Each structure stands twice: as C-alpha cells, then as structure tokens.
C-alpha cells in the first residue's frame, strides 16, 4: 500500500509556541527568539503503530493580520493542533472560535483534534488551571488534552502522534486496508454458506 500523507495544521493565538512546538517535533531544536510566523510548512516521516506515514505540517500565523488564509487551510487540513499557553487565559478562549470555524468549514463534528496547553515549564506563571482546560476539552467531545513544553521538549511527540492516530483511524474507516476488506468479505461469505446449509 502506498505511503499515506496526512495534513496537520497548528493553530492558536500569537506567541503561544506553535512554531517552537513544530520545530522541536520536526527538527529537534529549541528556538528562544520570537519571530511571528506568516505561514511555514514542514514534512516529516514517522512510524505510528507499524505504519509509515508522512506528516505535512502547516505552522500558521496567530496574529490577526494573517488570518485570510484560514479558510483554505481548514479545508485541506485533516487534523488540527489547537495550541494555547497555560500562562494566558485569553489564548485558551480564542481557540473556541477557531474550533467552531473548523467544524463549520469541514461540516464534521468529529474532526481529528488535540487541545494543547503549551509552556508547562512556566508553572509559576500559570493562569489556566489544568482542570479548566480539561473541562473545555471534554465539552468539545472528549478532545485529548495535553500540556507541553516546547522548551523542555515535554509531550511534543505525543501530541503529534495522538493527532496522527486519530487521522489514521478516520482514514481506515474511509479506505479500509485491503487485508481487512478481504477478511470482511470472507466472513460475509461464510455466513451466506451457513444460510444455504
Ligand atoms: N518558556 C517557554 N517559552 C516558550 C515555549 N514555547 C515557546 N516559547 C517562547 O514563546 C515565544 C513565541 O513562540 P513561537 O513558537 O514563536 O510562538 P507562535 O505561536 O509560533 O507565534 P506566532 O507565529 O506569532 O503565531 C518565543 O520567544 C518562544 O521562545 C515553552 O514551551 N516554554
Ligand atoms: Mg509561529
């Protein structure tokens, strides 16, 4: 079977750490400086549950002036990392609108998504209590919630792999693996045989 390519979009307010998370995941590097993104894309090959996949990752702009491209990447994206900073309550609240927009554009209530509270190393500056963010993730239909630190590279791989797994499950439902299809067919045939007997 050909190698699958999945489109992931990293979304959230300006300065929450989208580019740093992406850079840690793709290149294993930590970026201390802040350089607001317009739009960057990366490719990374990974193996998840024995399957080789290529992730095409779109790192988006948090700043309002660049939001014109949003609708387009929401259409092409198959999975979304919704990132806020645990040091900013407004960055969490701003994700609600993005999530609504994704659901509306994709006309799907169960789009693969992960809620990410970044900057977990700044515990002393925390203004989003963990239960508050967790409750929101539950209200969004049990969206997985992770706290990450791009600085310490904590939970970085986990959020991308979780999202990839969600996309894979959806993809398998749409295009079942040939072997699985075969098994189903055989099972069906057996049942027919039984009826004849
Ligand atoms: N302490 C700490 N700082 C972080 C972390 N992640 C990012 N930062 C810092 O936060 C600033 C902004 O990070 P970026 O990754 O550029 O933020 P962004 O979300 O991509 O911002 P935009 O591109 O403007 O949307 C940088 O100075 C980073 O060094 C983290 O996990 N911990
Ligand atoms: Mg950025």
Image: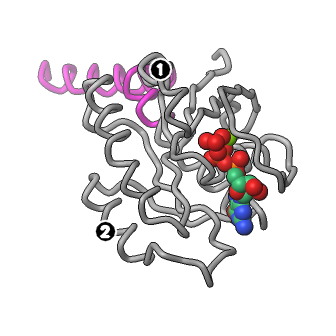
Helix, strand or loop for the magenta stretch, by majority:
helix
Q: Which of 185 and 134 is in front in this view?
A: 134
Q: Nearer the viewer, residue 15 or 152?
A: 15
Residue 23 falls in image quadrant:
top right
Badge 2 or badge 1: first in the primary sequence? 1
Magenta run includes residue 36: no
Q: Residue farthest to the front?
A: 65
Residue depicted at x 38% and y 39% = 98
Q: Where is residue 87 in the image (x, y as percent from the top left)?
A: 55, 69
Residue hosting label 1: 68
Residue depicted at x 44% and y 24% = 74
Q: Is mark 1 within 8 Å of ligand 1?
A: no
Q: Residue farthest to the bottom?
A: 124
Report the span colored magenta: 168-197
Residue depicted at x 46% and y 16% = 72
For residue 114, side relative to residue 197 (left or right): right
Magenta run includes residue 171: yes
Q: Is mark 2 within 8 Å of ligand 1?
A: no
Q: Position of residue 61 (x, y in %)?
A: 59, 34
Q: Where is residue 80 in the image (x, y as percent from the top left)?
A: 49, 38
Residue 43 falls in image quadrant:
top right
Q: In this view, does 38 lie above or below 84?
A: above
Which corner quadrant holds the C terminus?
top left
Q: Which mark is residue 135?
A: 2
């Amino acid at each position: 079977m050909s190698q699958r390519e999945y489109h992931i979009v990293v979304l959230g307010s300006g300065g929450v750490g989208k580019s740093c998370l992406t850079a840690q995941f793709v290149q294993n590097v930590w970026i201390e400086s802040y350089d607001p993104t317009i739009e960057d894309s990366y490719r990374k090959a990974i193996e998840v549950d024995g399957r080789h996949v290529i992730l095409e990752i779109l790192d988006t702009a948090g700043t309002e002036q660049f939001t014109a491209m949003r609708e387009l990447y929401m259409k092409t994206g198959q999975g979304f990392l919704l990132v806020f900073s645990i040091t900013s309550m407004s960055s969490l609240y701003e994700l609600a609108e993005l999530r609504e927009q994704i659901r509306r554009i994709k006309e799907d209530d169960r789009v693969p998504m992960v809620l990410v509270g970044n900057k977990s190393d700044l515990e002393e500056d925390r203004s989003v209590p963990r239960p508050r963010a967790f409750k929101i993730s539950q209200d969004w239909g049990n969206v997985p919630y992770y706290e990450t630190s791009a600085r310490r590279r904590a939970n970085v791989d986990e959020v991308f792999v979780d999202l990839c797994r969600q996309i894979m499950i959806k993809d398998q439902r749409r295009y079942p693996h040939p072997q699985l299809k075969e098994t189903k067919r055989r099972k069906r045939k057996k049942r027919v045989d039984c009826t004849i007997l």
